[in-house]
């Protein structure tokens, strides 16, 4: 059984920073691409960024200017460093493998990020 455990969220003022962590268990993590997802209040969950097992990264839109995705294969963890946070970044952040097999069935509890103006 695959488990995702997200942490590191919190309340931060606009312009501040947070680093989210994702622990993954129940599966061989090192070769898999992992993604971070953002679900704003009342909206669909959206992909923020992905990182391959080799460390190749892809970001949605211009988020690369503010966010950095990384991973530690030895710890089976992924991270999302978020800088210059905006109120639109508020929401719940999840990690998952960007493959239908996992997106359809496996989600953690997420971690809440609230950015105040």
Image (spheres, rainbow, N blue to C red):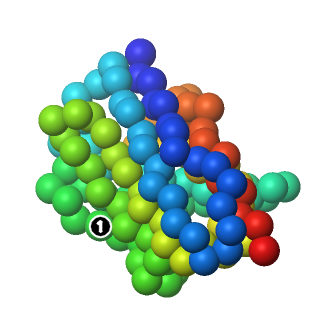
Task: Return the residue found at the far top.
Answer: 1
Which residue does the image show at 73% across and 71% down from the upper left? 87
Label 1: which secondary element: strand
Query: In x, y percent, where is residue 13?
Result: 68, 68
Instruction: Please state the horizontal and vertical placement of residue 26, each as a whole percent of the image.
Output: 33, 19
Name the residue at 29% across, 57% down.
70
Is residue 89 rendered to the left or right of residue 22? Answer: right
Q: Which image quadrant for residue 58?
A: bottom left
- The answer to whether any part of residue 114 appears in the image is yes
* Residue at point 29%, 67% (across, down): 57
Residue 100 appearing in the image = no
Residue 63 percent across, percent down from the top left? 49, 77
Q: Is residue 27 left or right of residue 30?
A: right
The quadrant where residue 11 appears: bottom right
Report x, y in % for residue 34.
Answer: 36, 48
Give the position of the C terminus as an image quadrant: bottom right
Q: Label 1: how many residues lie within 10 Å, few (<14), some (14-19) or many (20+)?
A: some
Near-viewer residue (49 or 22): 22
Residue at image point 38% right, 33% down: 23
39 displayed left or right of 5: right
Instruction: In the displayed orientation, state which residue is furthest to the right.
Output: 42
103 is higher (above) or lower (below) than 68 = above
Residue 56 position by quadrant: bottom left
The quarter of the picture where the N terminus appears is top left
The image shows residue 87, relative to residue 94, as above or below, that is below
Which residue is tagged 1?
A: 57
| Figure disc tally | 1
């Amino acid at each position: 059984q695959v488990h995702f455990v997200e942490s590191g969220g919190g309340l931060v003022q606009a312009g501040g920073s947070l680093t989210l962590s994702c622990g993954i268990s129940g599966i061989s993590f090192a070769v898999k691409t992992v993604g971070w997802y953002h679900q704003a209040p009342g909206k669909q969950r959206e992909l923020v960024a992905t990182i391959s097992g080799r460390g190749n990264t892809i970001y949605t839109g211009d988020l690369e200017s503010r966010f950095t995705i990384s991973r530690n294969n030895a710890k089976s963890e992924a991270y999302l460093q978020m800088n210059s946070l905006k109120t639109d970044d508020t929401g719940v952040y999840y990690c998952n493998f960007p493959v239908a097999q996992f997106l359809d069935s496996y989600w953690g509890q997420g971690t809440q990020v609230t950015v105040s103006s």
